[in-house]
Amino acid sequence: MPNTATLLIKPMLPWSEIWPPIWLTISLATTVTALLILLGTPIAWWLARSKSRWKEAVGALVALPLVLPPTVLGFYLLIALGPNGPGGMLAGAWGARTLAFTFEGLVIGSVIYSLPFMVQPLRNALENVGDDALDAARTLGARPLQIFFHIEVPYARAGYLSGAILTFAHTIGEFGVVLMIGGNIPGKTKVLSVAIYDYVERLEWGTAHVLAVAMIGFAFLVITATMLIERRHKRTDI
Amino acid sequence: MWHSDDSSARTARDHPKCSVWFLLRRFALRSEAHGAAQDWVGKAGLLLIRGFSFLVALSLALVTSFSSHAAEVSAAVAANFSATAQDLGSAFTAETGNTVSFSFGATGLLYAQISQGAPFQVFLAADDGRPGRAVTDGYGIDGTVFTYAVGKVVLYSPSLDLTDGGAVLVAGRFDHIAIADPNSAPYGAAAVEAIEALGLRDALASKTVVGENISQALQFVESGNAELGFVSQAQVIDQPPARVWRVPAEYYSPIRQAAVLLKPGEKSAAARAFLDFIRSADGKAIIAKYGYATD
């Protein structure tokens, strides 16, 4: 009776065990996305407008997490967040020894790891703001901040939207860095991807299936959404 | 656009450098004669694929015939045993000429991979439950399970004086204590048993950080992020005595690490030889050197 068995999976799921990782993952992704909108904007703006010869070097530095394996970042973060690194010094401000095994540590790791997913779409969007509009605004006496908020941000809103979606999704899907610096603490650092890994290891594949299929559905929605946004943006551009 | 019609065929045939084309065309004509589709480019692709797979098969045959002199054993090994296994591997190679390729991981994860057809020939687990289960589930060979090492749990810290480790645990003057995942790593389960035996389950709950396997638990301690942690004695065998507290044996059930020959290794003489070597006097001496007891 495979059909009844599949139906019965739902009430048998350990929901009290499943909800904390889901909630934690969503709060982590939300925090990281909000921080990266603030942090990514000046970086992307500088990369889009600057004529410095260091521009492409900085751009490459920002893009590094795209290429580096999470183990490289995880390894250096483990040291940097620890008692002998800057993270330990920062943690000392409130009497802790390390930022590893904390939500804050995960936020720092994920911000670095997802940086290119915010900066790249923003940079592209800001570069596409026409010089005509900027020149016109300057001629009319607009100050740089006015230009930024009244012309560049509205023009780049599609970039903000796809940057935010990609960052949020990428943080949800983050695994390697969290595994290396998180310490797998339920409710604090045990995120969804690590929880799935745990269920697979414990041979509780029923639960692993439910979470994994939900992740696949989520990822599909996110990618479709970004593609739709980009298509619509291109259409309104012309 | 690639469908051939007569005029294009003629011009191409007239061209002197089209010997490859001739081959393809001949193949296409033959298939047309057999009443097959006219898409000769597709047929030519098939021909190329056939030729390529012939080459691949040939090179594979060459490679396997060369390597049959010195066979390679592929072994899935529990993370706590990694240093010892490598030592065993090189001694085995020195003696027999056969090499061993190791895949290290948490016993639970390795078992999950074995159940999905991972090509491991030998499984050295950190418990005796999973090798037994491998046999009942049909992944292991009946009658090949044996205990190769009995592991010991120690408390380790590079910074604290652990001469009386129990007292250090009770005093609790630390922020983080690392253990391996008790659900998948037997050393993690043993650490939890020891913590419960000391009556410190609630006191340490908020300070416990969990490594994916015993190696990661040690990594948390070595990087200084956790002040101390429960690891296997084998991992810290070189450390000074004050850094290591041997957890009394009555605090946890013995960690009997069992090995099993897996289905992919059934016909491999080298895989059986490696298991025999682990059981030999030489093998046992190496295992004991790393702080394990042997049967």
Image (cartoon, rainbow, N blue to C red):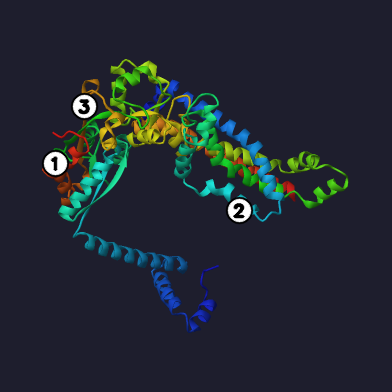
Position of residue B232 measured from the top left corner of the image (x, y, whole percent): 28, 32
Q: Give residue A80's position: percent from left, percent from top.
A: 49, 38
Mark 2 crowdedness (10 Å alpha carbons): few <14, some 14-19, many ≥20: few
Residue marked by disc 2 = A57
> What residue type is disc 3 on?
Pro
B127 above or below A223? above
Q: Can marks 3 and 1 be said to lie on one chain? A: yes
Q: Chain of mark 1?
A: B
Q: Quadrant of residue B154?
A: top left
In the image, which is nearer the foreground, mark 1 or mark 2? Answer: 2
Residue B254, which numbered label? Answer: 3
Callout 2: SS: helix
Residue in the picture at 75% in, 40% down: A154
Mark 1 lies on residue: B279
Q: Position of residue B18 (x, y in %)?
A: 47, 80
For disc 3, the neighbor class at 10 Å (few under 14, some 14 to 19, many from 20) is some
Image check: A128 left or right of A23?
right
- Residue B91 placement, left or right of B219: left
